[in-house]
Amino acid sequence: MNKLWIKWIFLVVFAVLFLGGCQKQEVPVSNPEENQYVIYYLNTGITRLEPVEYVTETRDVLDLIQELYQQLCTVPADLDAASPLSSKVELQRLQWDQNVLYMYFDANYTMMSSSQEILCRAALTKTMTQIPGVEYLNIYSGEQPLMDSSGNPVGMLSASDFMDNISDVNAYEKSELTLYFADETGQYLQAEAREVMHSINTSMERLIVEQILAGPETEGLKSTVPPETKLLNISVTDSVCYLNFDAAFLNNTLDVADEIPIYSIVDSLTQLTTVNRVQFSVNGSPSVMFRDRISLDALFEQNMDYVKGGDGY
């Protein structure tokens, strides 16, 4: 065997080993229509979530809740992971009512370390809200609502509260936002206070816009931006927030006044000290007419005239 042939074999073997080792592990994807879910365990160091694919034939909501919870509590023997719940924590009862799942744990739930409890909260929420018919999770401990470190009720949790998969609990924080959505008439804006758990790597500007796209949580309020809208890019320069949406932003499918979508975003973003004005673009171009009457080729400033209780109401 000549040296060239040996060298070629060596390169092939090296490429297989090196490139194979560099491949990223596929992240499991939830697809309830195909009975496919993701169970969120913790790594053994209790510092991040470990998503694992789970397939079931169960369709009944209550049975599925019980089944996924049992999966959370019982880690497969061949999996190097840990249950998000301490072995001392006992689930006393469940209640499912109008898209909200209430989970009542004993007092041992709040005895977990703060870092594990935050991870557990995320794991429970992200696992359970995959189930069709379960949009929110409300956790109780010792018959009392779960409280945060400041002594305030955590309240209802949704998957959107956890913007990114937690990879490091120390890089995770809660922010209080003031968001503006349409009132029931669609003619005015109304403020909604919301607490969101998110990665510290997510900018506040992006967090606010993504929460507006997710829609209101308060009964009686209406979405201001078509839910299919995608935020393509966001940046801030000299106190101007530059937003670039896809063409779905222009869809006139919501029964709200023409100015409401614009100032829903502007008035929410200008609550931040970093933003004074907002520039909109669609697919990279600001030279667009919104609803055939509002030119986006302008810098928009805060305008509380459209806010219920504001200067113009």
Image: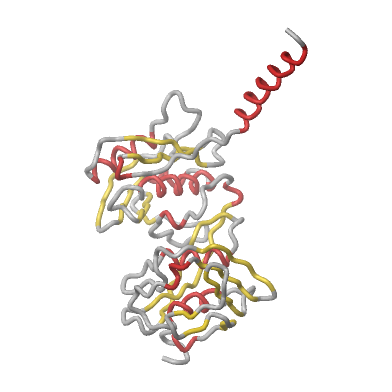
Question: In front: 165, or 119?
Answer: 165
Residue 284: image location, x then y, percent: 57, 68
Q: Where is residue 300 in the image (x, y as percent from the top left)?
A: 56, 82
Query: Which quadrant, please, contains the N terminus?
Result: top right
Foreground of the two, 184 or 46: 184
Q: Which residue is situated farthest in the left direction here?
A: 60
Q: State the colouring used for the structure image.
A: secondary structure
Q: Is residue 293 above or below residue 16?
A: below
Q: Would you say 104 lies left or right of 229 here?
A: left
Residue 57 placement, left or right of 74: left
Instruction: Decide which of 40, 55 is in the foreground and name it.
Output: 55
| Picture quadrant where residue 34 is located | top left
At a point 28% along the width and 40% down the height, the residue shown is: 66
**Frontmost residue, 29 versus 196:** 29
Residue that protrudes farthest toward the right in the picture? 3
Q: Quadrant of residue 167?
A: top right
Residue 20: quarter of image = top right
